[in-house]
Image (cartoon, rainbow, N blue to C red):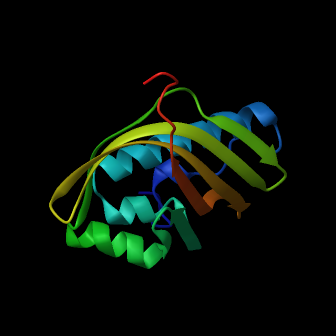
Amino acid sequence: MGESGEHESVAPAPDRGTPEADHTRLTAIVDDWAAAIVANDADRIGSFMADEWVIVSESGIADREEFLGYVRSGALTHSAMEAVAPPRVRVHGDTAVVTARITNTAHYGGQRFDADEWTTDVFVRRDGHWRCVLSHITPAAPPAGS
């Protein structure tokens, strides 16, 4: 952790405004966030989220504290999370949209769930730090002919 109590993985973007630097930084953040999720480290997971973060899925909307509460309690754990391909990163000033296809293995309420999902994360840059304000997940369609 840095002196301000923030994790190094959410350090300021190295060259604000250069598309290459923003793309590189956001790709690294997404990778670091996935590692925190697999580590089931609620505090580290939360460091990537803005206070107003929500996740939208087929079951509705969950806010930051609800999601992190499931992780803290052990009701929700992840044992794998991998990108199928590099993420699509688009930066619009101090807002970025990151879309990726992700496979993951989660356990919720004692049941295992294997997922293949499209994820879209909306990040905002505040005080030099990228924080996610919205995550949206939707199941990926099975390959044609399967």
Q: Which residue is pictured at 46% across the width and 38% down the height? A: 102
Q: Which residue is pictured at 46% across the width and 58% down the height? A: 2
Front-lying residue, 14 or 19: 19
Q: Is residue 87 above or below residue 113?
A: above
Residue 138: % across, % down: 53, 51
Q: Which residue is pictured at 57% across the width and 38% down the height? A: 100
Q: Is residue 87 above or below residue 73?
A: above
Residue 120: % across, % down: 61, 50
Tell me, yes or no, if residue 119 can be seen here.
yes
Q: How many marks?
A: 0
In the rendered image, the residue lying farthest to the top is 145
Residue 123: % across, % down: 66, 56
Front-lying residue, 36 or 56: 56
Q: Quadrant of the N terminus?
A: bottom left
- The answer to whether 129 appears left or right of 18 in the picture is left
Q: Quadrant of the C terminus?
A: top left
Which quarter of the picture shows residue 70? bottom left
Front-lying residue, 85 or 129: 85
Q: Which residue is pictured at 80% across the width and 35% down the height? A: 19
Front-lying residue, 86 or 51: 86
In the rendered image, the residue lying farthest to the front is 145
Tell me, yes or no, if residue 50 can be seen here.
no
Q: Is residue 77 above or below residue 71?
A: above
Residue 40: % across, % down: 28, 56
